[in-house]
Image (cartoon, grey):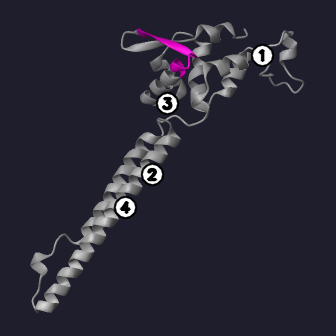
Amino acid sequence: MNRRRGDMVVGIFIAAILLVGSALSWQAFQQQQAFDQMGSMMGTSMGAVHGTNPLWYVLGTLLISAVVGGLYLTVRDDLPVAGANNQSLNELSRAADREIDSSPEDDVQSNGTINPEEQPRARVLDLLPDDERRILEPVLSSPGITQIELRDRSDFSKSKVSQTVSALEKRGLLYRERQGRTYRIYPSDDLQQNQVH
């Protein structure tokens, strides 16, 4: 699930909670009004027969909505951003395959910046969202880096590193090998072949 879909699902869920809570509050309010009218017609107090106070439904609805929204906000940052994460390895590989036969001097443009079309590795990194780039760059520069070292270099949480590595692994940009209690992470063979040294 990506961040956009999560926002939509949680928004719909909170809206449903608010609708149900509003309906229950309205029903309790109408019931209370009916008991009050019946009591005034009979000349006695019907206070002992009243159901739940509608205010409790309102407060309960708001509390449940706040708890659901708060819980979602705590995990929202760990969800991948929609859009760029859906690029396939083929799209990234095609961008990397645009390498043109030229001298290394041609790789640097006149203003001193690197031309990403001339350097596939830079092009692949340009196509990735920031969080994935922050994970893939150290893997490309230090193949076999451990997931713990990757967490330290990227300043991401343990779960964020694990989720991002899994997403990159599913797209075929890297792979990992178990080593004790952690993993060693390597760039995919396709990505290593397209690197310009």
Residue at 44% across, 46% down: 9
Q: Is 180 located above or below residue 37 in the figure?
A: above
Magenta run includes residue 171: yes
For discs 3 and 4, the disc positioned in front in the rendered view: 4
Instruction: Kindly indicate whether the residue at mark 2 contacts the one at mark 1 (C-beta within 8 angstroms).
Output: no
Residue topped by disc 2: 11
The residue carrying pointer 4 sits among few (fewer than 14), some (14 to 19) or many (20 or more) residues within 10 Å by Cα, namely: few
Q: Position of residue 48 (x, y in %)?
A: 9, 77
For discs 2 and 3, the disc positioned in front in the rendered view: 2
Q: SS of the residue at dot 1?
A: loop
CA separation, marks 1 and 2? 42 Å
Mark nearer the N terminus (3 vs 1): 1
CA separation, marks 3 and 4? 38 Å
Q: Is 122 located above or below residue 67 in the figure?
A: above
Start-end of magenta stretch: 168-178
For discs 4 and 1, the disc positioned in front in the rendered view: 4
The disc placed on residue 98 is: 1
Mark nearer the N terminus (2 vs 4): 2
Mark nearer the N terminus (3 vs 4): 4
Mark nearer the N terminus (1 vs 2): 2
CA separation, marks 4 and 1? 54 Å
The disc placed on residue 19 is: 4
Q: SS of the residue at dot 4?
A: helix
Residue at 11% across, 90% down: 42
Q: SS of the residue at dot 3?
A: loop
